[in-house]
Amino acid sequence: MKPMSLSLKAGLVISAVMFAIAALAPVIAPADPYQTHPAEILAAPSGAHWLGTDQLGRDVFSRVVHGARTSLLVAFFVALIGVGLGAVLGASSALAGGWIDTAAMRTVDIFLSIPSLVIALALAAVLGPNLVNLTLILGFLGAPFMARVFRSEALTLAQQNHVRASALLGAGFGFRLTRHILPNLGPLFATLVSTSMSSALMVASALSFIGLGAQPPTAEWGALIYEGRNTIMYEWWCAIPAGLAIALSATGFILVGDGLRDWLDPRSSQA
């Protein structure tokens, strides 16, 4: 196997650090992210509060660290749901062929013709603003596009000799799907999960910013930016650190996704 590219290594380091922060949040955070201190409202960064305090006197660094756990968990499950459903739908459609494939793809086209953000806003408003609903909505809305991508790859796999021979020998649809198609989509699956986490993180944070995701007092990066929006010109520490965390994490996921695509694709040139 060819060596990893520098961008892939950088992305893996960034992603690993962010996930480590999320996993070790209770250990890393120096204070309770929900504990208020009325006497220390909007305190500037200092030795006692590395990133200052917010409008309620809560330690911003602790809230950003704990926000990593919330934001990254939502991004991961949004990507996993969207890519997982898309893989099953796209592979099944390609393997079935005929009118089933046509009907499935026309349905996918209908969903793709409507801006997903508009649907997400409507569904979040109807179902209620919380992280569980937000995760499910964004995950399901990501599936149609992923189905298109996986179908394209699965069409090639379905025409390979061993898959066609398996069908001639009487292997059922489920056997061919789970033994010959889906396992060979693994590299594409890993690449798309990583890339999707970047967009999922930004969209979920944006929806939390407008009140359709995480609800107060939950520590979540989009919500933290919303809470600090009115004082950003003077007390920058209330919002800027969360924004930088989103940008850094999204960059790491994109680097991993692009790097995995080149590293795992046997058709790409040697590094």
Image (tube, rainbow, N blue to C red):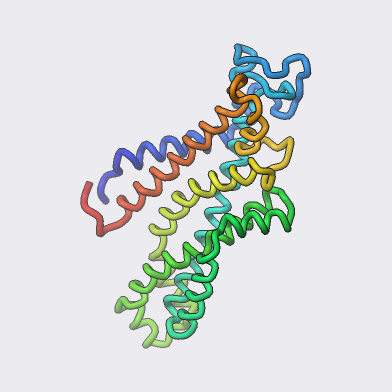
Q: Most extreme residue toward the left, as rendered?
A: 270
Q: Is residue 61 visible?
A: no
Query: Which residue is at a point 62% across and 35% down the rendered structure image?
Result: 67
Q: Relative to residue 203, is residue 188 depicted above or below? A: below
Q: Relative to residue 244, is residue 185 depicted above or below? A: below
Please tell me which residue lies in front, 203 or 10. 203
Quadrant of the rendered structure where residue 220 is? top right
Quadrant of the rendered structure where residue 148 is? bottom left
Please tell me which residue lies in front, 178 or 60. 60
Give how far across and how far down residue 260 sits, in percent: 36, 50
Give how far across and how far down residue 119 sits, in percent: 61, 59
Give how far across and how far down residue 61 sits, in percent: 61, 25
Query: Which residue is at a point 47% across and 53% down the rendered structure image?
Result: 193
Please tell me which residue lies in front, 158 or 202. 202
Query: Which residue is at a point 44% across and 85% down the rendered structure image?
Result: 98
Q: Relative to residue 205, is residue 264 depicted above or below? A: below
Query: Which residue is at a point 41% across and 53% down the rendered structure image?
Result: 191
Q: Is residue 120 visible?
A: yes
Q: Is residue 127 left or right of residue 68?
A: right
Please tell me which residue lies in front, 119 or 44. 119
Q: Most extreme residue toward the right, as rendered?
A: 38
Give how far across and how far down residue 254 sits, in percent: 42, 45
How many badges with numbers are in the image? 0
